[in-house]
Every structure is written in structure tokens, then in C-alpha cells.
Amino acid sequence: MLDKSVFLKPVAHRGLHNATAGVIENSGPAFEKAIAKGYAIECDLQPASDATPMVFHDETLDRLIGNETGPIAQRTPAQLKRMAYKGQTARILSFAEFLALVDGKAPLLVEVKAEHGLPPKAFLSKIAKMAAAYEGPIALMSFNLDVVKALGRLAPRVPRGLVLGRQEVLKTWLARAGRASEGTALSRILDGAVDDVSFFAVGVNILKSAAAWRKQTGHDIPLFSWTVRTKAQRATAARYADAPIFEGYEA
């Protein structure tokens, strides 16, 4: 179970980053700034060529790394850890380095990326082993319910959650080719997942429907909301979520 007294606080999305100020997402400086402000931290994991978990959002290096392109999964951990972010000295962190940096000083929501079905089993196994051994507050999450279930088998004591956005709900809604509303489609997804998760992280544009589902069903399960950026989104998250996953301001 998720310890609500520890985790239900503002969560810095990919750390407290600000590219204009030279602090890049998912970098050591972004995580250090989040820790200094007392926030929880969200980060992302992608596999290196040997399935080592690396702290990086995109499947490819192109957007964030200077003079490097192509899939992160085609590079070794040693190669990746030598790569600096564009215009910065900060380098890509491995999951192990990230955990050592945080060292229990902030609650962690770790998203396991799985854009194309189940990722390599070794990738999930390494994540689960490190998360289970970590002595600070940590939870794992993914958009892929099969990944969430696999992590539950590998590390049953580590809290885990399902991430949902409007795109995922619409896929389910359209696939059923029925007359169900978006809210009904979301309810079906939440109903099907609730027994396998400790929390949900839902897009702020479907948060109200998720909160209505929770009220109607009586499930006492935490709701995080992402990615909260605007004043209006902050108000929505404050009303319907237990904690925002935010960026672009200081909560």
C-alpha cells in the first residue's frame, strides 16, 4: 500500500526542471532542486542496450542530448552515462545513480516506460530488485497494466500505480465501438485495474471523471494528477486530486 502520509504531497514532474534556467528534466540538478524544496519526485526509466534502467523520458536521444541521436536502447550504460544534456554538464543518470542521489530524501514516483508492449524482462527485473532494496519511499508506475502486474509479481511490497491519460481512455472507448461515454470508458478501466494497484495517476483533463468514479465506488485509493501546469489545472487538481504532478511553477 501507498503510505499516504509520505507520498501525498506535490510531485515535481521529472524533477524541478527549468530549461530556460539551464536545469534539464530528469537530471541530477533537477532532482536536487526538488529535494531542496521538499517535493516528491517523478522520473522516467528507459532501458539501455543491456536492459540497465536509465533515467530518461524519450525513446530516442535526439531531443535532449547534444550531438547524439537514435534510440537509447541501442547504447550501453557506459556510453549513456558519458552523454551530457544539450548545453549542460549534467549527464544521463542510471537508476542506481538516481537512487543514490536521492537517498531517501524525497518520495519517488518512478514511471517505467513501455511504449510498445512489455519491455524486456531483464529491465523489469532490475527495476524491481533495486526498488525493493531501496530504503527510501518509492513507488513504481506505468501506462501499461501488464507492466504494473509484472512489477507486482517481482516486487510485491513496492507500491505500484497505473498512469492514465485521455488518449488511453479514448482507445478503449473507440475499441468497444459502443455508445459508452468517455467517463464510462474510464470507469471500466479503473474497475479493471483497481485490485492490482495502490494508486492511479490520471491526466488532469480526465481527473474530474476519475474522482467521480472513486466517490461512486467508495474505493479509498489515492489519485495523483498530471501534468499540472496552468492556474486552472492547479485549481482542478486541488479540488479533485490528492496530489499534483506538476511542472513550470513551484507548488
Image: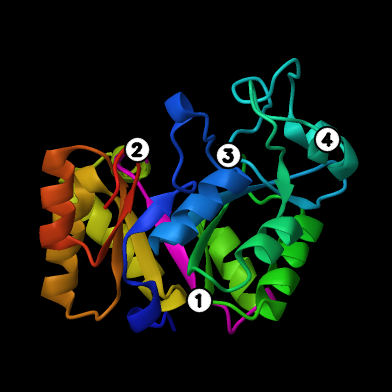
Q: Secondary structure at mark 1?
A: loop
Q: Are marks 4 and 3 in contact (CB under 8 Å)?
A: no
Q: Quadrant of the N terminus?
A: bottom left
Q: Earlier in the sequence, mark 4 or mark 3?
A: 3
Residue 63 visible in the shown view: yes
**Structural distance between the alpha carbons of marks 4 and 2:** 35 Å
Give the residue type at disc 3: His
- Whether residue 184 is in magenta: the answer is no
Q: Which residues are magenta?
A: 154-167
Name the residue beneath numbered marker 3.
57
**Structural distance between the alpha carbons of marks 3 and 1:** 21 Å
Q: Disc 1 vs disc 4: which is toward the camera?
A: 4
Q: Are marks 1 and 4 in contact (CB under 8 Å)?
A: no
**Structural distance between the alpha carbons of marks 1 and 4:** 32 Å
Name the residue beneath numbered marker 2.
167
- Whether residue 160 is in magenta: the answer is yes
Quarter of the rendering containing residue 188? bottom left
Name the residue beneath numbered marker 1.
159
Q: Is residue 70 left or right of residue 199?
A: right
Q: Disc 4 vs disc 2: which is toward the camera?
A: 4
Residue at (59%, 75%) from the top-left corner? 152
Q: Earlier in the sequence, mark 2 or mark 1?
A: 1
Packing grade of label 3 (10 A; few <14, some 14-19, many >=20) is: some
Q: Earlier in the sequence, mark 3 or mark 2?
A: 3
